[in-house]
Amino acid sequence: MMIVGIDPGDYGAIAVLIAASDNPPAVYDQPVQGPRSKRLGADLREMDDLLLDILEDSENYDDGEVVIVIEKPIAIRGRYSAGTAIVTRHYKAWLHLAKKRKLDTMEVAPRTWQSRTHKNITGSTTKEKSIEYCRQRWGTATSVWREDACEAACIAAWAEIKLRRTK
């Protein structure tokens, strides 16, 4: 089974984890329009192309099953920001693409995946804990990942644990 963890953040990342494998997930930057420093939003065509490439790779695995896991955006009551609007657009774009491709999709709140993957992990921030989880699970190969990539990998790892329990 291939699990695609998606952090639809401002810049976002995608992690492709092969369930029950010791190999670190493949990670990708979320496709965005224009330079990454401008925060112009997701590039839907590039997102779809990336998803198609991932689906082609899935055919190389035993069951060819693919599950998409997307982190739900959170809004803080009484506070609106342009960043929240961008993240929500990214989230909706990934949901749309998964539905268009008829893929099994799971949505997960940040606190849900964090409560499982960050258990017994040291660090003062969520990003630090995500980076440390990846380092502990997959080793130094993850040291070059941005924190968004580590969070996407943690989202995929959470889904792997959850799906293992339900089978």
Image (tube, helix red, strand yellow):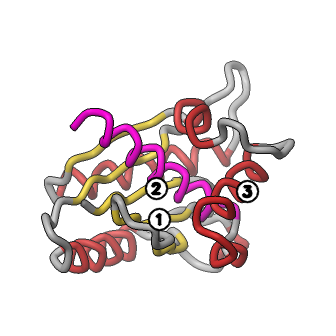
Q: Mark 3 points at which residue?
A: 132
x and y, in percent, of residue 132 in the image: 73, 56
Residue occupying the point 62% across, 30% down:
75
Q: Residue 15 carries which label?
A: 1
**N-terminal of the two: label 3 or label 1?**
1
Residue occupying the point 66% across, 41% down:
118
Q: Which residue lies furthest to the right in this view?
A: 124
- Asked if residue 71 lies left or right of residue 147, the reply is left
Q: Which mark is residue 6?
A: 2
Q: Callout 2: few (<14), some (14-19), or many (20+) C-alpha neighbours within 10 Å?
A: many
At mark 2, the secondary structure is strand
Is 71 rendered above or below residue 149? above
At mark 3, the secondary structure is helix
Amino acid carrying label 2: it is Ile
Q: Of helix, strand and loop, which mostly describes the magenta segment?
A: helix
Q: In which quarter of the image is the C terminus?
A: top left
- Was residue 134 drawn as part of the magenta stretch in this picture? no
- How many angstroms separate mark 1 from mark 2 (CA)? 7 Å
Amino acid carrying label 1: it is Ala
x and y, in percent, of residue 79 in the image: 73, 27
Boundaries of the magenta span = 147-167
Amino acid carrying label 3: it is Glu
**Mark toward the viewer: 3 or 1:** 3
